[in-house]
Each structure stands twice: as C-alpha cells, then as structure tokens.
Amino acid sequence: MEITLTKKIKATPEEIYRALTNPFTIQLWTDQDAVMEEKEGKDFSLFNGDITGKNMEFRPNELIRQVWYFDDKESEVVIKIFQDKNYSQVRVEQTNIPAEAYENILSGWKESLLGPLADFFEA
C-alpha cells in the first residue's frame, strides 16, 4: 500500500528541511526524542523510537529519502520540498506500507508529522 500527501507550510524550503533533519529542531516541534544525522546510510529514530529506519539520500532543501522499518518489512519514504510563492509545499510519498499499519501511518503523517510541522512555523 502507499500514501501520497501534500501540505502547504508557511516557511522556506531551508527552514522545513532543517526542521526535518536537525534532531534538536525535530524535538522542538514533536516534543519527542529524535536521533537523526544528515548522513546517508545512518539509522534514525523519531517519536521516542516509535519510528526507526535508515537515511538513504539527502538533497539539501529539496529531498529526503528514507527507509522505515516495520518489524521485518521496509517501507520507502520520500519527502520533497519546493517553494510555492510565500509558502513551501511538502510532498510525502510512502510505499510498501504493510496493510495492517496503513491507517496508523496515514493518521500519523497528518496528525503527528505534517500538521505539527505546519503549526510549528505558523504559531
């Protein structure tokens, strides 16, 4: 299964990219522990370890590609960031989602990731 979501956020691509790759900034807008290094091949952990995976590719201010782990399965996540006038668009594509995790992942993107990220910049 797969998910594609787009969110308009009142921030620059640079600010959004930093908010998604800097562990201290991630902790500010999630209020949860985060382990993140902006290095390809490095493992990461978000939301106190509820999300774990490996960073596969970084294009500063444009793209983050990760693999998320679900028990013995892997799901690919691609986050694209692009300028849209006074806003930025954040497009999330996640593939190979286990059917039993689909609803939790979808609501997680909306309620725990994209929503709070937008709120962080618009507060």
Image (cartoon, rainbow, N blue to C red):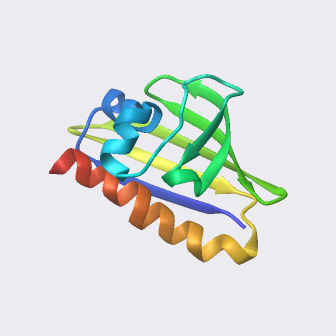
Q: Quadrant of the N terminus?
A: bottom right
In the image, residue 48 sits, relative to residue 16, either above or below, namely below
In the image, residue 96 sits, relative to residue 44, either above or below, namely below
Q: Is residue 85 left or right of residue 59?
A: left
The residue nearer to you, when weighing 64 against 45, is: 45
Q: Quadrant of residue 7?
A: bottom left
The residue nearer to you, when weighing 38 against 96, is: 38
Residue 74, x across and y down, in percent? 78, 52
In the image, residue 51 sits, relative to residue 121, either above or below, namely below
Residue at left offset 53%, top offset 33%: 36
Residue at left offset 20%, top offset 38%: 86
Residue at left offset 49%, top offset 59%: 5
Residue 29, x across and y down, in percent? 32, 48
Residue at left offset 35%, top offset 36%: 25
What count of labels does the image hold? Answer: 0
Residue 28 appears in the figure? yes
The residue nearer to you, when weighing 45 against 7, is: 45
In the image, residue 104 sits, relative to residue 79, either above or below, namely below
Residue 8 appears in the figure? no
Residue 91, x across and y down, in percent? 48, 48
Residue 21, x across and y down, in percent? 47, 32
Q: Residue furthest right?
A: 72
Q: Quadrant of residue 26?
A: top left
